[in-house]
Amino acid sequence: MTGNGQIREIVIVGGGTAGWLAACHMARKHGDSGLRVTLVESPDIATIGVGEGTVPAMRQTLHYLGIRETDFIRRCDATLKQGIRFVDWRHAPNGTQRHHYYHPFDYPAIDGIDPTPYWLLSGQPGRYADAVGVQAQLCDAGLGPKTLVDAEFTGPAAYAYHLDAAKFAALLTEHATERLGVVHRKAEVLQVELGQNGQIAALHCSDGKLKGDLFVDCTGFAGRLIEGSLNVPWRDRSDTLFVDTALAIQVPYDDPEAPIACQTISTAMPAGWIWDIGLTGRRGIGHVYASSYIHCDQAEQQLRDYIGPAADGLDCRRIPMKVGYREQAWKGNCVAIGLSGGFVEPLEATGILLFDLLSRMLAEQLPGHQDELGAVANRFNRRVNHTWERVIDFIKLHYAVSERDDSAFWRDNRDPQSWSQTLQENLAHWRHALPSRYDFASTMEVFNLENYLYVLYGMGYDTQLLAERFPHAEQARQRAEAIARRHSQLKSQLLGHRQLISRIQQHGLQ
Ligand code: FAD
């Protein structure tokens, strides 16, 4: 500790996406008040180097941190993401075409009449996403979500980004050190010195000793401080989410003008699923799978088959994953943010979202004095654990409502014994009632009503409703017409996604 019990020296260990986000948030919030932020990262331990999909909250973060969208797009090979297209997560109803559904970011239907019950009562005609909005069709047509005259961070359709993880960390490094005053030390933490109160007193690094008042562990799955020194256990959740390994291949485009998908594509496989993310110069494609259901060689073959001849001669990286979260993300004067604090499979791009959210929460709730650490930590931990449990429920939902039974992986996922009590109760309730806002009561739930509606009804979940409770069929029909008009209007305004990105790269946004 640096003296008199005040919290003035923040030390962040780890220079991956989580470490730099934590540093930026801390410095952005407290840089003007004399608080010093130091980030120490090992020059020899690589970052995980994956994590390419985000959710719309990233736009607010860039804006808040003062990073221009145009710079971000140029520097991180970023593209725009309007949602996720899920392929093969259920059997095709007619057995011929492959099933797909969208989880887009827009949910415009909530104000005014909600078409959901009318769509359900008429037997779920067509795709749910088309019944409530236009974004699935924009994705089908390969259109970007904004025009060149839309201001930075806005557009007629909601969007997030796909990005190159290493380039994003480099941009955050520059921003943190050059604009926000973060001190950067390239050194490895070799030993952690604990004080008599059991809290971290100092770090012994390869370049000397480093004292601090609060330490943020962003050392990835290693959890060098939170686990290696403070012995906080990991709450393993592989009993619910079975996938534990990833294989990743970077695939260049054959043609530099090839269209770029404006959504993540997630294709279900016999023991997991494949992500497919289009950046400007390459696609990032990976297979996340449950190693107890399939051998690594077979999983790699399935990934290479998915990619086709373009995969020939390309390296495939294997990444073991720990699924779960720390029992206490915050212990004493150490807070774990990033893979050190928790992780679930990247099906809904929750990693960066949660690490960003927790970094901001930590910065905003930072106590002024050591005496307050315990109480703030308890509240923080309660919220964080609740958030992880609800995220796990939402990821599990994707499997739980699938009727796929073609492999042990899918059959075991459908077994309610692997679902939480909350998910079991919700799914039983939603057999005869629409999901509602009241089912999502906490401000720390990152997946809410709209997200559940898209997945449940994209997957054809059967909710039996009393027709007489929904007497506004004519208004619902008018709403459908308005959606169709909006679609044709946007189609004529929006550019193809690659074209839009190229123009932003060349000329910037106005
Ligand atoms: P890392 O990137 O592992 O960084 C750890 C840092 O700690 C490094 O700088 C290292 O040098 C440093 N370090 C370690 N030990 C020491 C030491 N002793 N001394 C000093 N420094 C040390 N998230 C998403 O939001 N979207 C996605 O699409 C997505 N896809 C993913 C796919 C896979 C397969 C995996 C595994 C994760 C994915 N994630 C995704 C999560 C994403 O990777 C993480 O959010 C993100 O990269 C944060 O990692 P990190 O900073 O916690 O750890």
Image (cartoon, helix red, strand yellow):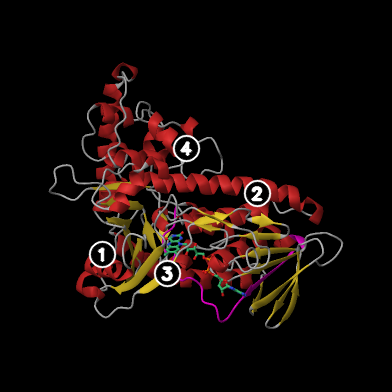
Q: Which mark is residue 380?
A: 2
Residue 59 sits inside the magenta stretch:
no
SS type, badge 2:
helix
In the rendered image, which quarter is residue 314 located in?
A: bottom left
Q: Which mark is residue 319?
A: 3
Kindly report the distance in space between the C-alpha atoms of the residues bearing marks 1 and 2: 43 Å
* Comparing labels 4 and 2, the label whose residue is closer to the camera: 4
Residue 45 sits inside the magenta stretch:
yes
Residue with the mark numbered 1? 259
**Going by the picture, which residue comes out furthest to the top?**
468
* Few, some or many residues within 10 Å of mark 1 (<14, 14–19, 20+): some
> What type is the residue that disc 3 sits on?
Ile
Q: Residue at x 27, y 33 (%)?
A: 480
Kindly report the distance in space between the C-alpha atoms of the residues bearing marks 4 and 2: 23 Å
SS type, badge 4:
helix
The answer to whether residue 218 is seen in the rendering is yes
Task: Note whether 271 is above or below 248 in the view shown.
Answer: above
Chain part drawn in magenta: 33-55
> What type is the residue that disc 4 sits on?
Gln
Q: Earlier in the sequence, mark 4 or mark 2?
A: 2
Quadrant in the picture for the N terminus: bottom right
* Few, some or many residues within 10 Å of mark 2 (<14, 14–19, 20+): many
